[in-house]
Amino acid sequence: MTEFASRQSATQGGQTPLVRLRDAPRTLDMLFCGALAWGLPERYWESFLRMYAHYVTRGNKARTAKHIRLLKQMFGSRFDSALRLNIVYTREYHATRTIFYRMRENAPYRWAPIIHVDGYQHIEEALSYGRGAILWDGRFAYGSVVTKKGLGRLGVRPHHLSRPSHVDMGSLYARKVLSPIFLRVETRNLTERIVLSANSALASSHDVATLMALLQQLRANEVVSITVGQRAMQTITIPLFGCRIKLATGPISLALSSGAPLLPIFTVRNAAGEYKVTIERPLDLAGGGDHRAKIEAAAHDYATRLAPYALEYVDQYDLFRESAVEPIEDGKPHGTPSEGTPEETEPSQGVAAESEPAGGEPETGEPTEVRNPKRQNCPG
């Protein structure tokens, strides 16, 4: 087994302070969640997680209203007002459960979920070509944690690309104390974490070196993983139901330049509390046209793959982290991901990895047991 390593820029735009004011609430939050995650058997988490999700949904009315507007904008009349509120409520439930899992991983008795991995043969086939494989992990609530744990059980420990904000947390104290606790479930299942510099794009020599390191691993027929994101200097907008969302195209460019297959991954939690990691077949990168046309075709292909997961597991999809969601104003009906043509929005190159969360009165009504009529698998 390869020892975990981390590559990070030596210069992150100034001296890192020893502590920051925000370290105090972060520490208290981790102590509180850690005590519950360690002390309570997992079967007793349900009532607390429901109560906490209710508190956050009703307590932060501005954020709840924003999330409801995003749902209405993207899905139109597909969900009524009560169901939209319930989706926001269950999204908080899943987000808090993920934090509990991160804390439980630090206990002597680790978190041991049931994880089903479908499509592992696509990784094997990709590696048989000798050019490595790029795993493109979708932005779902359990993706960052469960994907790595599920693949780790199969012996797949990728070289993972991350943003500095996902690792550093802003102070030496957070970097040395809080970050290792929060990320342990990930680092146990990675060979290496390669960290972008603070500007999160290819504007510095460090980031060029970072991508060269990724290319080196792919040439050695290794597995590289990148989380889907939208914060980068090279992005494209793709249609998804009633909106267009930004998508960082660095992973597509990396696949084109290396010849490595780009495999989308979608990780979700089902009604039985079990997890499913689906490794899709590679995106089509062999289409005709120039480099930009190939990027557009691959992004369009990704939107088509994403749509059914985003709809069926809407309360786990990270729509709320999409910082640039634009409505489609062409009068076309909601519900198909293939409408429109992707548009490149910025000229420079960049790769997006993990990003930070984004944040009116909400529509009336308490969180209810109204379920997504398509999937019937909200918590409980």
Image: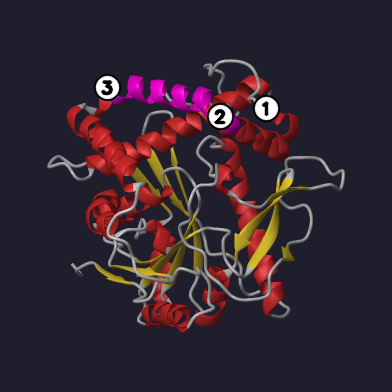
Q: What residue type is labelled 3?
A: Tyr
Between 216 and 183, the one nearer to me in the picture: 183
Q: Is mark 2 on a helix, strand or loop?
A: helix
Q: Residues within 10 Å of mark 3 (few under 14, many from 20)?
A: few
The reply to whether the magenta stretch includes residue 360 is: no
Q: Which residue is drawn at 57% across and 64% down?
A: 283
**Which residue is the extreme one toward the right?**
331
For mark 3, what is the residue?
A: 44
| Residue 130 in the image, given as x and y percentages of width and height | 40, 80
On residue 79, which mark appears?
Answer: 1
In this picture, which residue range is highlighted in magenta?
45-62
On residue 304, which mark appears?
Answer: none
Q: Residue at x 49, y 33 (%)?
A: 91
On residue 87, which mark appears?
Answer: 2
Asked if one can make out residue 359 in the rendered structure from this viewpoint, the answer is yes
Q: Which residue is drawn at 38% across and 40% down?
A: 275
Labels 2 and 1: the sequence-earlier one: 1
Q: What element carries label 1?
A: loop
